[in-house]
Image (cartoon, helix red, strand yellow):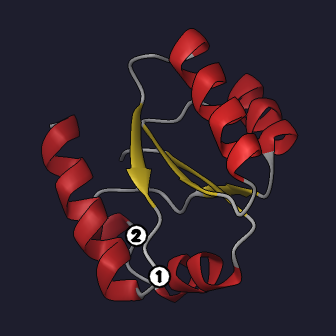
Amino acid sequence: MYKLLLVSDQEDVLNAFAQVSNWEMNGFKAPHIRHDFEGAVDSLAKHHADGICIALSDPEEEEKLLAYLQEYFPDVSIFEGGRTEEEVLRYLSELKILLN
């Protein structure tokens, strides 16, 4: 099973991820969820992530996180946050192909 980190403060993205009920059937564990840069860094210090979804409302914080990931986790896949369950499942399918 692949492990995910969701870093988002956007309610629609958080709700879309919450609607996914069959994580394991899609090859993933339910994601660790953090809401900001500091939470993401803390989670990555404690948990491995194969893929990271970033959807932050503050562009500067998002850029800061992307720079951090590029420096310390350059091999981790980063993907877009879906706003519906269907979008999330499509992104997960694409990510699974990439990770395989």
Q: Quick one: SS at disc 1?
A: loop
Find residue 39 and report its image quarter: top right
Q: How many marks?
A: 2
- Residue pictured at 68% horizontal, 58% vertical: 56
Quadrant location of residue 94?
bottom left
- Mark 2: amino acid: Trp
Q: In the picture provided, is 94 more to the left or to the right than 49? A: left
| Dot 1 alpha-carbon crowd within 10 angstroms: few under 14, some 14 to 19, many 20 or more | some
If the image is split into quadrants, where does the C terminus sit?
Answer: top left
Seen as rendered, the residue at the extreme right is 38
* Residue for badge 2: 23
Q: Secondary structure at mark 2?
A: loop
> Height in image: 99 above or below 87?
above
Give the CA distance from mark 2 to mark 1.
17 Å
In front of the other: 48 or 60? 60
Q: Earlier in the sequence, mark 2 or mark 1?
A: 2
Left or right of 3 in this view: 91: left
Residue at x 28%, y 70% (from the top left corner) = 25
Is the residue under label 1 in contact with that under label 2 (CB below 8 Å)? no
Q: Position of residue 35 (x, y in %)?
A: 79, 58
Give x and y (percent) for residue 66. Answer: 58, 32
Residue 95: horizontal and vertical position, in percent? 25, 50
The residue nearer to you, when weighing 57 against 96, is 57
Query: Which class describes the residues within 10 Å of circle 2: few (<14), some (14-19), or many (20+)?
Result: some
Q: Position of residue 5 (x, y in %)?
A: 58, 48
Q: Which mark is residue 62?
A: none
Q: Which three-letter amino acid code belongs to the residue tagged 1?
A: Arg
Residue occupying image coordinates x 64% and y 76%: 14
Q: Which residue is mark 1?
A: 83
**In percent of the image, x 71 and y 64: which residue is there?**
57
Q: Is residue 99 left or right of residue 11?
A: left
Q: Does 11 sit above or below residue 25?
A: below
